[in-house]
Image (tube, rainbow, N blue to C red):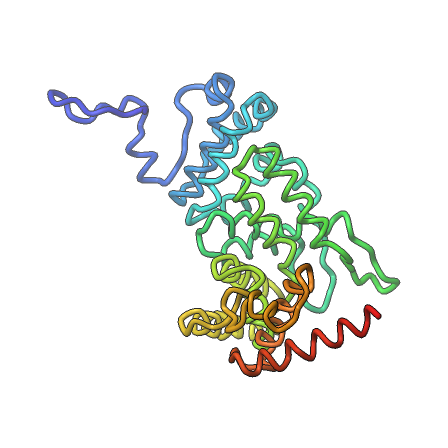
Amino acid sequence: NAMAWSPEEGLVDPFGGMEACRQKRITAVGDPATRFREDALRILRALRFAATLGFHIDADTYDGMLKELPGIQRISRERIAKELNLLLVGSHAAQTLRCYPRILVAALPPLQPMLHCPQRTINHVLDVWEHSLRVVAHSPAQLALRWAALLHDSGKPLSLTADADGRTRFRGHPTISADIARDCLTGLRQPRRLTDRVVLLVTHHDDRIRPATVARWLSRLGPEAFQELVLLQKADLLAHAPHMHDQAKQMDAVLEQARKLVADGACLQVRDLKLNGQDLLDMGYPEGPLVSQGLQALLNQVLDGRMPNEATALRTFAARWLTSQQSRMQ
């Protein structure tokens, strides 16, 4: 709002805004510290503009941001969430976070330990923070996906152990990262649906999906969440050491396989089976949990490719399965 247009005078630009734009520079009007003291949200907004436009922040302006950084704690969580959401889907999000990490961790203190946390393993050449930024950069600009990319390894600093030779290990970090993700997004009062999706993606980011398990994962997650998980895993692999990049390319085949299964109307849910609960009751199944358990057993057979989704084959298996369950109960 430092520039205006007048029908009589044309562009009114008393603070050199056009020149700043030409230089791709974000500059506060007047004294930066005063501007950020008036409204600390402007600190995050400057970051958002940088991430969206690919601009850099003027040195004096950045100094003013740092001086007034404590003011972020007085901003409502909802306003912070809005700026961070817009920042993360920006075309230059990773580069902006790389240049100005102190601003982000002021808004999200649990991410502080990620900075300079080492990863001395055969599959990594970057520390946790830089690796996470690379995952953000390789991820499509979808909000849940970008949040998951940023937070997927947030639990590594808390799970870090080192072998005698200095090699680092991060046992159980997906679970810890998922807890941090939920705490961060809940603290920002993000929508429940977004929070749950990010937590799901973070929880499973290390559970590599193989061609043989695509149908099961599709059944478990649904097409939309499945696609996001595959894209997260692909971005994660691209941010690993170079010898892991071939695995990233394989994720494209996994996505194509999933698309074909959905397009072909593959049996992915119990409701898709050529046998239903009433059919099992008619076969002699007692009312109760054995019906739903039997249907799930049938679905698992189909998902694993051990049985076609055909009524005759399903009936034969369902009869054998019921007999085996009744024998166990005797």
Residue drawn where x is 27% and y is 25% of the image: 3
Q: Quadrant of residue 171?
A: bottom right
Establish if 15 lies above or below 191: above
Of 125 and 19, the residue lying toward us:
125
Q: Position of residue 60 (x, y in %)?
A: 49, 28
Q: Position of residue 23 (x, y in %)?
A: 35, 40
Report the side of 269 relative to 19 (left or right). Answer: right
Residue drawn where x is 73% and y is 54% of the image: 173
Q: Is residue 60 visible?
A: no
> Residue placed farthest to the left in the image?
8
Of 2 and 201, the residue lying toward us:
201
Establish if 283 lies above or below 7: below
Of 253 and 69, the residue lying toward us:
253
Report the side of 177 relative to 28 (left or right). Answer: right
Q: Position of residue 289 (x, y in %)?
A: 69, 60
Residue drawn where x is 51% and y is 49% of the image: 144
Report the side of 305 relative to 265 (left or right). Answer: right
Quadrant where the N terminus sits is top left
Residue drawn where x is 48% and y is 70% of the image: 258
Report the side of 291 relative to 228 (left or right). Answer: right
